[in-house]
Image (cartoon, helix red, strand yellow):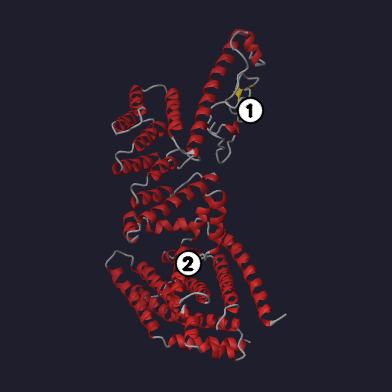
Amino acid sequence: MSGSRRVTLVFSVLLAGCLSASVLLLRRLDQARTDATLEEVLYISSPKALKRLSLGYDGLLADIYWTRAVQYFGSKHHAGARRYDLLAPLLEITTALDPHLLVAYEYGANFLAPKAPGGAGMPERAIELEEFGIHNNPNEWRLYYNEGFIRYMELKDYAGASEVFARGARVPNAHPFLAILAGKMAEHAGDQQMARMMWSTTYQTTKDNNVRANAAAHLRALQVDEDVANLEALTGRYQQQTGRFPASFSELEAAGLLRGTPRDPFGHTYQLMPDGRVEVRTPDDFPFIQKGTPPGYVPPLAPKFLPAD
Amino acid sequence: MRARIAHIASNTFREAVRDRVLYNLIVFALLMSGASILVGQISINIERLVVINLGLTAVSLFGMVIAIFIGIGLVSKEIEKRTLYTVLSRPVRRWEFIVGKFFGLAGTLVVNTFFMAIGVFAALLYVSHSFQKPDAWVLVALYFIILQFLIITALTLFFSSFSSPLLSAVFAFSLFVIGSFAEDLRGFAGITQGVTRWLATGAAYLVPNFSALNVISSVAHSNPVSGQLILYNSAYALVYATVAISGAVLVFEHRNLK
């Protein structure tokens, strides 16, 4: 083998070996400094200072901070975290750098508002974020809708939600549903009915598959909660009439209290328990249900989202 | 072989230290360290923070500029002045020439960093009146900066082995900027799907990861640096520099110099 060929071979092997080793080392480095990039956010937590330091490239920096916010929330959410301390500063920096980055308000507020583990449990910060968005983008009806949604869902602030929906309804090209929601809020319509209306609106108006899947999961959970409450009321009535709980749904049918075997939104039959309680067969498929779970049921750390339809 | 590489390295070092631009850049870096004292004084209780942040940033940026602007001429100047032919006509292999050039410039940068670091520590001593225990982490940050220089030197040498000096500088500087956002790039790859995911992941692992080597903000806040990070960063810089040097050797070995 000539000298040149030997050099080529040796350095080719060295190049390939070291390239593979560098990938492995990068993975080790990632493990050694989990969240390091995000922790550094707090070193310059002033959005105004960052805007000045960006030397006019604030749009690009906003995109980078938004990506960091998504990664931070995603990784924490996946791990079932109950604290999201850096989420609000990340979102505030993102929107200060680019006040017209609508996606940061729309999704960011939905990351911030719900209680853990679904979100950061910071509805007030989410409302502040939406208000900042509305101030900078007064013609975006979705921002009003999001804020009203959070006020109603997380804070049960009917008056506040009604006022925000009414403001949003006056925006040119606003979804006509905003005016209806403003009216319903003012009337303090029943929680179940209102919640269904809100999630249905979200399901119908969003363009994002993840948001639609989330809305679908909430709608299914509302359906299950309603079904279980109705079925347990029937088993209670049966017990009052006969002195015992029904052994099966067919006994309820025979007593004329029920028509057909009840099924959950996925088509599985509900389970009737000996003490008259009603349970779903696959509680993990219904991440937001309040009723119908076995006693002592612990939901998975990260909610399981199924396809929207 | 070792003697030949050492000889080329020492010649490269001597040639580099004769360059006046080098001294101007070091003086600028020292001035920035000095200016950090003034900047710290017009704020409240952040003198030490500003001295470390501004001082180490100056060392890093000016070192990068030195590495790129001296690195791009290492091969092209030798071809331009026709001294390369004299060197290669002797019993010097092409790969020895490249490796020797790398060690020569790396040595220059280590010496430069030493002098610029004296400036940072002098400014630190001026504002704090005495050294504190957390100041030892500044040394680790400086060590990481030297590791960055090794990577960028190897990359510059790689680009200059097949490209013009101007393009080599553009490529090296672009990689420095991209590498500073390497973790964001990997994060982006993580949230994409399909072909984009493969391409983004490949690019993310191919570009040098300078973000893991930047602990300036962390040490400015007196945060310790883990031994694990020092170990992995050292190994990574060594391995990545070897990749770039191997690439440079492979290109240069087959380059037609006639």
A187 vs A24: above or below: above
A181 vs A29: above or below: above
B117 on left or right of A296: left
Q: What label does residue B175 carry, if any?
A: 2
Q: CA distance from mark 2 to mark 1?
A: 55 Å
Q: Nearer the viewer, residue A282 or A142?
A: A142
Residue found 50% across the figure and 26% down from its top: A222
Q: Position of residue B79 (x, y in %)?
A: 50, 84
Q: What label does residue B27 carry, if any?
A: none
Number of marks in picture: 2
Question: What chain is tagged by disc 2?
Answer: B
**Tag 2: amino acid:** Leu
Q: Quadrant of the C terminus of chain A?
A: top right
Residue found 57% across the figure and 62% down from its top: A26
Residue found 49% across the figure and 50% down from its top: A71
Q: Nearer the viewer, residue A189 or A105?
A: A105
Per the image, label 2 sits on a secondary structure element best described as helix
Q: Position of residue A149 (x, y in %)?
A: 39, 33
Q: Is residue B167 visible?
A: yes
Picture quadrant of residue B9: bottom right
Q: Position of residue B152 (x, y in %)?
A: 49, 72
Q: What label does residue A281 carry, if any?
A: 1
Q: Position of residue B205 (x, y in %)?
A: 56, 61
Dot in front, 2 or 1: 2
Residue found 58% across the figure and 86% down from its top: B5
Q: Nearer the viewer, residue A277 or A227?
A: A227
**Tag 1: amino acid:** Arg
B16 on left or right of A304: left
Per the image, label 1 sits on a secondary structure element best described as loop
